[in-house]
Image: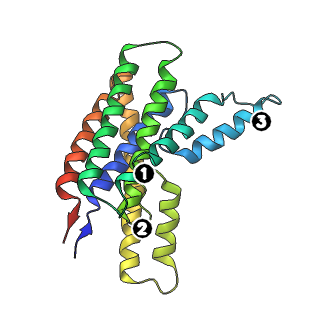
Amino acid sequence: MMRVAVGPFYALSIAAGCVDAISFVGFHQVFTANMTGNMVLLGIAVVSRFGALPVTIGFVFPLVAIVAFIAGAVAPLPLFPAGLHARRAATVVLFEGILVAIAAIAFALFHGPVVVPLCIALVSFAMGAQSMVASKAGLPGISTTYVTGTLITALTRGLSHGATDEHRRDAVRNLWVIVAYVGGASLGALLFLAFNRNVLILPTLAFAAIAVWLDRRAFHS
């Protein structure tokens, strides 16, 4: 029986946390993987139009991120009519790396009012596509970008009455995904300190490596 290997999805979780931290620091405090955070920011921004709040948040950037993420999640759907396909999943992740590479070049070399929203759109689209690949893998609770859902899945599968050994193994796996995401966020912050506006170049290389990993090792017996 062939099963989906979880290793590449740990790596994608690290990458998602990394680019989310980079986006928050570099793209005016907007997330590109964590859409729950963007929806909170969007709600605050809407209310701030009606009165003064102790924070100033624009609604354009969170909205761009949400729309691009949804578009990215929808785009690869025709490639997976019957669950995960390793070669197609690898292609999506490679395309994801190309989008992040374009954002990396734009952020490193150009300045102006269009650069940040362009980078937000490119990276959010990539994260949406990545989330769909993770969803098609069928690994319970592992979306690589939706950490809150992963935590709840870990708790319900690991602590619920009558949980089986398989459920407990899933719960441990879910917790490792959360650790990977948080570790990736820390790595993203460190990379920003070290490389500033050149920071997205390393995540681009990571996506290319993960694409090869998915293509060759997505399934195991």
Task: Name the residue at 24% across, 40% down.
Answer: 208
Q: CA distance from mark 2 to mark 1?
A: 13 Å
What is the crowding at mark 1: few (fewer than 14 residues within 10 Å), some, or many (at least 20)?
many
Say which residue label 3 marks. Answer: 47
Q: Position of residue 21 (x, y in %)?
A: 45, 37
Q: Amino acid at mark 2?
A: Pro
Q: Nearer the viewer, residue 153 or 77?
A: 77
The tally of labels here is: 3
- Element class at badge 3: helix
Q: Earlier in the sequence, mark 2 or mark 1?
A: 1
Residue 5 falls in which quadrant of the image? bottom left
Give the number of the mark in front: 1 or 3. Answer: 1
Q: Position of residue 115 (x, y in %)?
A: 47, 19
State the quadrant of the N terminus: bottom left
Taking 42 as reference, is 95 left or right?
left
Q: Which mark is residue 157?
A: none
Up-down relation of residue 145 to residue 122 (above or below)? below
Q: Is residue 185 visible?
A: no
Say which residue label 2 marks. Answer: 140
Task: Name the residue at 59% across, 40% down.
Answer: 38
Q: Which mark is residue 131?
A: 1
What is the crowding at mark 2: few (fewer than 14 residues within 10 Å), some, or many (at least 20)?
some
Q: Position of residue 96 (x, y in %)?
A: 34, 39
Q: Amino acid at mark 3?
A: Val
Up-down relation of residue 221 to residue 63 (above or below)? below
Task: Name the residue at 51% across, 18% down.
Answer: 114
Q: Amino acid at mark 1?
A: Ser
Residue 29 falls in which quadrant of the image? top right
